[in-house]
Amino acid sequence: MKQNLDQLMEARNLDALVASGKIHGNPALYYLTGGAGMTSAILVKRRGEPATLIAGPMEREEAAATGLDVVVSSRYEYASLLREHSGDLLAADVSYYQRIFADLGVQGRMGFYGLRDQGQAYTFLHALQQAIPELEIANEYASNVLTAARATKDAAEVARIREAGRLTASIVEATVDFLREQRVGDDEILRQADGAVLNVGAVHAHIRRLVGMHGLEDPEGFIFATGRDAGIPHSKGTPAAPLRLGESIVFDIFPCEAGGGYFFDMTRTFCLGYAPEPVQQLYDEVHACLQHIGGALAVGEETRRYQQLTCAFFRERGHPTIAEDPKTLEGYVHSVSHGLGLELHEAPTFRDTTENTARLERGHVFTVEPGLYYPERGMGARLEDVFWCDGDGVFHNLTEFPFELVIPVG
């Protein structure tokens, strides 16, 4: 959590951290500024000291609204540095940061965070290290101090995720209502009021409108896939494909708060009109697995155990899994869970690898999403709920939406 940031910095031997870039879509800076309504900024924090937000003159009021200590960037006279270095952007940027660090008393071992082109970031940090030899740039790769802090959520963060979940459930409900209203032809294909075939693309367009109407954004898109596409986990669906009775539909929707905030993630599988027996069986086994994993959640348990439990559950029912064959494209083919927050996929990870030493902790918010996929048999099923472990170690399901495979239509 954010209040643990100084302790995490100490544990990682960081004297200071810098986060920079745009705010929207930049989890590091969004997290540290509380989602400031700004275009871009630089935030500097020394261990044990309040953070300082460096903002452009045009956004000084928005910066002040964060409650952080604010310095207006004109104080460091970037234009003069650019002239001094004859328009050399790299040299001017390095000198700019040198002025900031000198002014704020920043030194020692530092972590750098935020979004920047990879080559640009490498070039800048290499030049900065050469210009300030006494500066040590922390080498963090698999996990950094901010992803570690963000892995556990406080009550305010959970409230925002829960509200995003409520709105997401409303979007799914409205989509189901839209499908119920369609007509069905003699060929079991859905048709709109004007007689035109209802295809996946038209449903996608309707979902996009619903996302906007509910005040959310879908920067990662969503999945509404039918038939064979439902058997390929991340197929978003073929726009021209008509909606037919009896085909499995995987609807996986993962919007976030407007402005690049907290995500939600839920999946339901549907059939229109009726469910063929093979699809019903697939659905029932996935639903049973979701309940099995949800009932086994425990504080302190290794996260990788839940992937092992899922593979065992499906293997016992005759399905191929990636535990036996990592290359399988049928059966159970992905991880059962991932952390959720300012990124759609964040810590903790549930990968079943020896390197994964993560354990379930109080404050974790994560998905549980078992699925079974048989694209060559034209079907797939996935169900996904979001769970939160509170301060008492109690697990709460944040997804408030029923399980119903068959949607009556016509």
Image: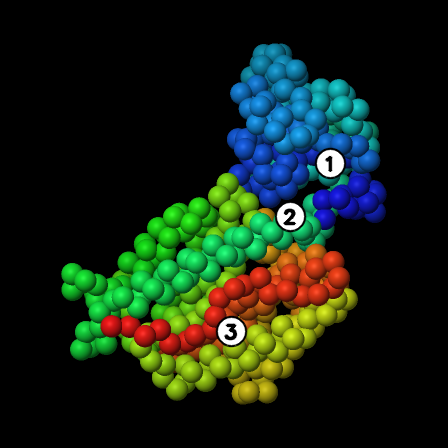
Give the mark nearest the N terminus, 1 or 2. 1
Image disc number at residue 17: 1
Which numbered disc, 2 or 3, marks the residue that appears first in the sequence? 2
Residue at 16% across, 61% down: 194
Q: Which mark is residue 250?
A: none
Read off the residue under disc 3: 371
Q: Which image quadrant for residue 36?
A: top right
- Residue that sits furthest to the left in the current view: 194
The answer to whether 314 is drawn above or below residue 258 in the figure is: below
User: Circle 1 sits in a helix, a strand or a loop, which is it?
Assistant: strand
Whichever of callouts 1 and 3 sits on the residue coming sooner in the sequence is 1
Within 10 Å of disc 2 (Cα), the crowding (few <14, some 14-19, many 20+) is few
Task: Point out the frontmost of discs 2 and 3.
Answer: 2
The location of residue 291, given as percent across then percent down, is: 59, 76
Q: Pointer 2: what residue? A: 156
Instruction: Say which amino acid is labelled 2.
Output: Ala
Q: Amino acid at mark 3?
A: Gly
Category of crowding for the residue at label 3, using alpha-carbon neighbours closer than 10 angstroms: few (below 14), some (14–19), many (at least 20): many
Decide: marks 1, 2 in contact (CB < 8 A)?
no
Residue 161: give x, y in percent of width and height: 57, 53
Identify the residue at horizontal 69%, vertical 62% (top origin): 389
Quarter of the figure with the C terminus: bottom left
Q: Is residue 107 left or right of residue 346?
A: right
291 lies above or below 214: below
Inter-mark Cα distance, 1 to 2: 24 Å
Mark 2 vs mark 3, CA separation in Å = 31 Å
Say what amino acid the circle numbered 1 marks.
Answer: Leu
* Residue 348 visible at all: no
Q: Quick check: 47 left or right of 338?
A: right
Callout 3 secondary element: strand
Viewer-side residue, 229 vs 1: 1
